[in-house]
Image (cartoon, helix red, strand yellow):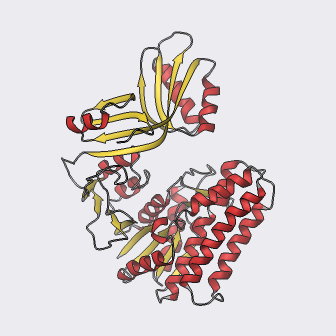
């Protein structure tokens, strides 16, 4: 049985966590298993700090941030392996040497390109360590460089997949490796024809697992999380959340589109195309029911709440007092697309067009410059977008209360509300 597992950063944050992952993997060792691994713990955040300091030419701060990453991974290795003579120490050292070569030069390339070359280090480190540990405990494992398999264009930080080349590369490499044992590879990363590293968007390891599942015609795919499965709301924000044991592909796509963080938005489509079931399970309680996502015909769901943070509201008013008609809509969306700004909600009047977008200041500033000749653009920051699916009147009243709502939209039982980031729900 061919399966794909994905383990996120929380599941491998330290040595004990990696031992727990190994115990889960051992249960499925009789299957043909490809394991997708994210960077350990908060390593991606730490590597972003390294990049920022490097970009700003803050050398001492950059070295301090990088030293923390090095010490953290050394601690994990010291806790997992009996001797510092183990080959993994040399392999990890070589990865850091490659990174040091980049950081020794003045930053001359584009920020997004540098992001992918530098931040990708986290996944290379984590997969080397996990692969070495699985071999150490007797689980035959091959480390695979995903950049040789997932082929992308040069859209750094949000690369587009060349599906034909990717499928051919995966099918040429992975089945033969799985015949020998487990395969461990990196989530989040891809590679260009020039052999530059790309990334698939923040939290993109789920998508990586879906790509492998699709290309290998996997029996199923499992994402191992620190929650019991897909819940009706974020338990950090709401009390009395419930486990949703089954979701259709369509419902899962809707939830991820609106910002549900339990699954990456691009994950579902490749699985749906081949009717590959997705299981969201807990690495804390591997025997738990979890959530199954598949070709289910489900007519009723409980109310589900998704909160998307770091939002901004842009209100564009036509300077020439002409209606915002179809032609103007087309140009506005083209401007948003050109700056790669994700639109999460829209609303319009005769003269104004409002959009709720992910708050990426540099992209928004570029958009304002593009539009200022024809539009007055107002920006409201520090917002969040609350989406309620399958809402009830009681729940709507509970969420709205006395809160200031900047934008509201209702379509059937689905409601979207833009409110201040500090509003307590």
Q: Quadrant of residue 4?
A: bottom left
Left or right placement of residue 261 versus residue 286 in this view: right
Q: Find residue 245 and report its horizontal and vertical position in percent.
A: 24, 59
Q: Quadrant of residue 231 in the image? A: bottom left
Position above or below: 185 against 328: below
Which one is in front, 162 or 84? Answer: 84
Residue 116 visible in the current orientation: yes
Q: Is residue 197 visible?
A: no
- Residue at image location 35% in from the left, 81% down from the top: 27
Q: Which quarter shows the N terminus?
A: bottom left
The residue that appears at 46% across and 86% down in the rendered structure is 139
Number of callouts in the render?
A: 0
Residue shown at 30% from the left, 31% from the top? 410
Where does the image place residue 148, in percent across and percent down from the top left? Answer: 60, 67
Q: Is residue 18 left or right of residue 44?
A: left
Residue furthest out toward the top: 321
- Is residue 163 shown above or below 320? below
Q: Residue furthest left?
A: 299
Pick the quarter of the image with the C terminus. Answer: top left
- Image point (24%, 57%), residue name: 246
- Residue 156 placed where, x, y %? 62, 51
Q: Depth check: give the residue in front, 268 or 171.
A: 268
Which quadrant would residue 143 be assigned to in this image?
A: bottom right
Q: Nearer the viewer, residue 165 or 161?
A: 161
């Amino acid at each position: 049985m061919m399966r794909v597992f994905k383990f996120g950063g929380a599941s491998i944050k330290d040595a004990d966590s990696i031992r727990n992952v190994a115990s889960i993997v051992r249960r499925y060792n009789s299957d043909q298993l490809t394991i997708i691994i994210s960077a350990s713990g908060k390593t991606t955040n730490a590597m972003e700090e390294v990049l920022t300091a490097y970009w700003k030419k803050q050398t001492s701060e950059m070295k301090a941030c990088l030293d923390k990453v090095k010490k953290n991974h050394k601690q994990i290795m010291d806790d997992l392996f009996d001797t510092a003579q183990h080959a993994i120490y040399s392999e990890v050292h070589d990865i850091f040497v490659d990174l040091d070569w980049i950081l020794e030069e003045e930053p001359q390339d584009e920020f997004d390109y540098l992001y992918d070359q530098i931040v990708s280090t986290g996944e290379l480190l984590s997969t080397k360590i996990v692969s070495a540990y699985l071999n150490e405990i007797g689980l035959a494992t091959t480390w695979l460089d995903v950049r040789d398999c997932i082929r992308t264009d040069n859209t750094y930080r949000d690369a587009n997949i060349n599906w034909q080349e990717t499928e051919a590369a995966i099918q040429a490499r992975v089945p033969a490796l799985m015949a020998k044992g487990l395969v461990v590879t990196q989530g989040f990363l891809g590679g260009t024809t020039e052999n530059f590293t790309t990334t698939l968007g923040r939290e993109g390891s789920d998508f990586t697992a879906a790509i492998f599942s699709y290309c290998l015609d996997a029996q199923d795919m499992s994402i191992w999380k620190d929650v019991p499965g897909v819940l009706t709301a974020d338990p950090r924000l709401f009390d009395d959340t419930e486990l949703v044991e089954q979701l259709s592909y369509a419902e899962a796509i809707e939830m991820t589109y609106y910002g549900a963080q339990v699954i990456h938005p691009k994950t579902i489509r490749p699985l749906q195309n081949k009717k590959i079931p997705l299981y969201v399970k807990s690495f804390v309680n591997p025997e738990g029911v979890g959530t199954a996502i598949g070709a289910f015909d489900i007519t009723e769901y409980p109310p589900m709440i998704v909160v998307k943070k770091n939002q901004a509201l842009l209100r564009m008013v036509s300077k020439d007092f002409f209606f915002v008609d179809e032609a103007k809509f087309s140009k506005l969306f083209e401007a948003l697309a050109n700056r790669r700004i994700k639109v999460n909600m829209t609303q319009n009047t005769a003269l104004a067009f409002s959009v709720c977008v992910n708050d990426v200041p540099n992209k928004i500033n570029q958009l304002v410059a593009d539009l200022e000749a024809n539009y007055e653009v107002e920006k409201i920051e520090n917002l969040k977008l609350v989406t309620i699916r399958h809402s009830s009147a009681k729940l709507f009243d509970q969420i709205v209360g006395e809160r200031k709502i900047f934008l509201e939209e209702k379509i059937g039982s689905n409601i979207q509300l833009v409110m201040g980031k500090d509003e307590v729900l």
